[in-house]
C-alpha cells in the first residue's frame, strides 16, 4: 500500500492564522502574499469568533480555506485568565462559502462587528457558553452538523486537563505543533497527548500550524510564522480536493522534514525522506522501533517491520537540527495486516 509516492504532489499548508479581522497584525492580503512567497499553497485564516469567507483571494495556485477559531472559557464574559484552562477549536468549513456562526455569544464575539455577525446563519447551541464537558461536546456536535471539520488547538497552551480532552469526541485532528504557542512556552509538542488519544480509541489525525498573529517581524527570533505546517497529499489546491484529503487523513505535520515516500507491504514499511538522523516507529511510549546510524550521520530512506503485537503504529522522522515530521497512526486493518 502506498500512502505517499515519490511523485505525489504535496501542498504546504498553514491551517491556523489570524489577521487584522481579529488580533493579528497583517491583512488577509498580506498573509496570502507572505505565505505564497514562502512556497505555501494553502492557508486558513481562522480569526477569533469571526467566520469570514476569504475565497475571493484564492487563485489557481493558492487556496484559502474558510474557517474560524472559537474558544470557551471559565468566564461568562470571556475574560482571559493566565492560570485557568480553556478550549480553542478551529472550525474548517467543508465548503468555501459556509460562514455559519456556531453558538454566537456577544461576550465572545469581540472582533467581528455584531451587526455583521448577526447576518450569518446561526448554528444554535442550547444554553449560554459554559466551560463544561457537556456544553463543549454539544458545541462540537452542532459544529459538525453544520458542515465543519474541527481541530483541537494548542492543548498545552490551553491548559486543559488531559483527562477531559480524552473524553471529547468529534475532532478530525490534533494540533501537535503550534508555532505561536512554542514562541510563548517553548514546549508545544503534543505527540504524548496524541498517543493517549490513540490508546483511548480516538483514531484522529495530527497536524502542525503557525497560529500566527505577527506581532513580531519575520526576522525576529520569536516570529510566530513559518515554523510548523501541514503537508497535504493533494494534486492541486482545489477546495474539494484539499478538504477530502483532510477528511481522509492524507497529510502529515512538519517543522522542516519532508517525507517523500511511505509504502507498506504486509508488515514491511519502506520510507524515504529529506536527510534525517533518526526515524521512530511508535507502538506505545514503552515500545518503539528506531532506525539510525550509530555515528549520527544522516540518511534518506529506511525499512522497518511492524511487530505482531502492535495494534497501530505512527511515525516520527527527526533531522539533526531538531526539525521533524509526524505521521498519523495507521491501524493493522488500514495496513491490510
Image: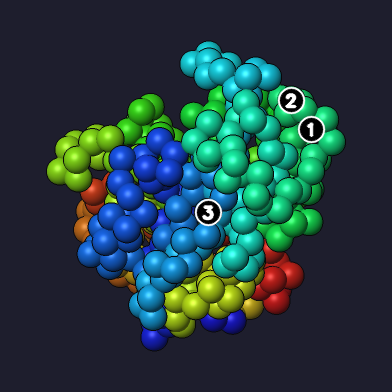
Residue at 74 percent of width and 35 percent of height: 136
* Front residue (pair 173, 21): 21
Residue 48 in sight from this viewpoint: yes
Residue 260: quadrant of the picture = bottom left
Left or right relative to 210: residue 100? right
Per the image, the residue denoted by label 3 is 52
Residue at 66 percent of width and 73 percent of height: 335
Which is more N-terminal, label 3 or label 1? 3
Crowdedness near tag 2: few (<14), some (14–19) or many (≥20) residues, C-alpha within 10 Å: some
Give residue 305's position: percent from left, percent from top.
55, 68
From this viewpoint, which residue is outermost toward the bottom?
A: 7
Per the image, the residue denoted by label 2 is 130
Which is more N-terminal, label 3 or label 2? 3
Quadrant location, the C terminus: bottom right
* Colouring of the image: rainbow
Q: Are marks 1 and 2 in contact (CB under 8 Å)?
A: yes
Q: Under tag 2, what secondary structure?
A: loop
Residue at 45 percent of width and 53 percent of height: 45
Left or right relative to 186: residue 315? right
Amino acid at each position: 500500500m502506498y500512502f505517499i509516492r515519490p511523485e505525489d504532489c504535496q501542498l504546504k499548508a498553514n491551517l491556523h492564522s489570524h489577521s487584522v479581522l481579529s488580533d493579528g497584525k497583517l491583512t488577509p492580503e498580506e498573509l496570502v502574499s507572505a505565505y505564497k512567497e514562502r512556497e505555501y499553497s494553502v492557508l486558513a485564516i481562522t480569526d477569533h469568533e469571526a467566520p469570514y469567507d476569504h475565497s475571493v483571494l484564492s487563485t489557481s495556485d493558492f487556496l484559502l480555506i474558510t474557517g474560524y477559531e472559537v474558544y470557551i472559557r471559565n468566564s461568562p464574559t470571556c475574560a482571559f485568565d493566565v492560570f485557568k484552562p480553556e478550549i480553542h477549536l478551529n472550525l474548517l468549513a467543508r465548503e468555501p462559502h459556509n460562514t455559519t456562526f456556531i453558538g454566537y455569544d456577544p461576550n465572545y464575539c469581540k472582533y467581528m462587528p455584531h451587526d455583521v455577525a448577526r447576518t450569518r446563519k446561526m448554528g444554535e447551541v442550547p444554553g449560554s457558553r459554559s466551560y463544561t464537558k457537556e456544553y463543549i461536546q454539544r458545541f462540537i456536535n452542532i459544529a459538525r452538523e453544520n458542515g465543519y471539520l474541527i481541530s483541537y488547538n494548542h492543548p498545552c497552551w490551553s491548559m486543559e486537563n488531559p483527562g477531559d480532552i480524552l473524553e471529547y469526541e468529534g475532532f478530525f485532528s490534533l494540533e501537535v505543533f503550534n508555532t505561536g504557542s512554542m514562541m510563548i512556552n517553548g514546549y508545544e509538542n503534543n505527540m504524548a497527548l496524541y498517543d493517549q488519544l490513540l490508546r483511548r480509541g480516538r483514531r484522529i489525525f495530527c497536524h502542525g500550524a503557525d497560529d500566527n498573529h505577527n506581532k513580531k517581524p519575520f526576522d525576529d527570533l520569536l516570529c510566530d510564522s513559518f515554523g510548523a505546517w501541514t503537508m497535504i497529499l493533494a494534486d492541486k489546491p482545489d477546495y474539494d480536493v484539499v478538504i477530502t484529503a483532510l477528511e481522509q487523513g492524507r497529510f502529515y505535520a512538519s517543522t522542516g522534514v519532508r517525507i517523500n515516500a511511505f509504502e507498506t507491504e504486509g508488515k514491511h514499511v519502506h520510507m524515504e525522506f529529506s536527510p534525517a538522523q533518526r526515524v521512530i516507529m511508535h507502538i506505545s511510549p514503552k515500545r518503539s522501533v528506531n532506525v539510525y546510524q550509530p555515528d549520527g550521520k544522516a540518511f534518506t530512506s529506511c525499512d522497518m517491520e511492524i511487530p505482531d503485537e502492535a495494534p497501530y503504529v505512527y511515525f516520527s522522522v527527526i533531522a539533526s537540527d531538531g526539525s521533524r515530521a509526524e505521521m498519523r497512526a495507521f491501524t493493522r486493518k488500514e495496513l491490510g495486516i
